[in-house]
Image (spheres, helix red, strand yellow):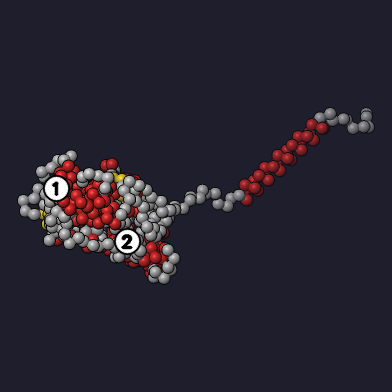
Amino acid sequence: MRDDPVRDNNMPFRIFCYIVLILTVSAFFVNACKSSGDRTQPTTKKTKPLDEGTIAALPLTYKTPADNPSTPEKIELGRLLFYDPILSGSKDVACATCHHPEFGYAESIDLSIGVNGTGLGEKRIFRSNNNIPFVKRNAPSILNTAFNGIDANGNYVPEEAPMFWDNRAKSLEEQVSMPVKAFEEMRGHGFEEADISVEVEKRLNAIPEYRKLFAEVFPEETSVSFTNVAKAIATFERSLIANNSRFDQYMRGDKKALSSRELDGMRAFMTSGCARCHSGPMLSNFKPHLLGVAENKKLPFIDSGFNGTFAFRTPTLRNLRLTRPYMHNGTIQTLDNVLLFYEDLHGKELANKNLNRSQLDSLAVQLKVQFRDIDAIIEFLNTLNDNDYDRKIPEKVPSGLPVGGKIK
């Protein structure tokens, strides 16, 4: 019988297995503890807050197109043409008929009455035996159109300035000719669209005073041209500036120009998201947006707006006190109701029954106008009014026709 122990040849392998087992169990418990310690809150992705937009004072001066510089003489010629109904087919309506200084160069009715109308503003009606339709959109103000297209940094190009509710024209020069050619606005019966500009040239060339004035303003031309008619009226319209409201004064550094209540309204205007569209010095981004405004029942058709999208350009908020009613078709009469319209975008059925909520502009969906802020916002909007603008009306026009058309 042997006294020495029997040698176990598998001992090193068993020791190795035990070590591996211990390390595996230890790793398990370490990971379990670490996992337990991480059970706080799951990490959530932060979304970037929407930019509230930027608002600013208007420039003190305005730019003019390179091919149509402004002169005092051209402004005054444009003024005469603006008030002279000789530009209309029936010689009864002028540019000033629907853009009168009494109403901030806009009009106090929802849809304009052009050809075959009589009276001014809310007193304007069609004459008897009428077969001319209403103008299909509300007449926007011409004040400050020199700045159309201006961005938050004050940059703009007058040759590319967006015009009309659907941005269908660029520059005041292009815009001027369109109402003259439009059937319901100024052309009426008797002339085709392609012929009215030739007729206007013929009429003006037959008037000695106009020939003299055009020769002084456009000495390189031998006769009156429709192109220069548009240039003269555009120059006059561009001169109609109202750029020194109390808001402008405040933004230029006069911190006493606005009251604390008006500043509260400005803050609410910004935080509500209004300035995402009503931005820059004109408080407009000049872009079309779909808001679902109700159709005007005076129209026998549905107005589908910009490129058939039911979107309409953001209007300026300047001189709102003078330019009611509001929206592209004048269907909202007061600023209170405009803001209530925006508040109702979040819950009530759309005012326009031809549209559904999924079609609303994304910025309109994100707008958060609170009922409690409406009065303060309106007080702020009233600081954008500037009554100190050119209201001069000619005593007479070279054609001898009634100044402003049939408005009395």
Question: Residue at 73% of width from left, 38% of height from top?
Answer: 21
Select label 2 or label 1 by which is in front.
1
Judging depth in this view, the residue of 296 and 168 nearest the camera is: 168
Residue 197 is labelled as none
Residue appearing at x 21%, y 46% in the figure:
224
- Residue 380 in percent (x, y) is at 35, 65
Residue 250: x and y, percent?
Answer: 41, 65
Q: Is residue 51 above or below residue 381?
A: above
**Amino acid type of the residue tagged 2 in the rendering:** Ala
SS label for mark 2: loop
**What is the x, y in percent for residue 124?**
14, 58
Earlier sequence position, callout 2 versus callout 1: 1
**Disc 1 target residue:** 206
Asked if disc 2 and disc 1 are in contact, CB closer than 8 Å, the reply is no
Taking 204 as reference, is 104 left or right?
A: right
Q: Write the residue at 36% across / 52% down.
A: 63
Kind of residue indicated by mark 1: Ala
Q: Is residue 258 left or right of residue 196?
A: right
The location of residue 241, given as percent across then percent down, is: 31, 59
Residue 118 appears in the figure: yes
Q: Residue at x 12, y 61 (%)?
A: 408
User: Between 83 and 75, which is closer to the camera in this rendering?
Assistant: 75
Distance from the alpha carbon under mark 2 to that under mark 1 = 36 Å
Question: Which label number is shown at residue 242?
Answer: 2
Q: Quadrant of residue 325?
A: bottom left
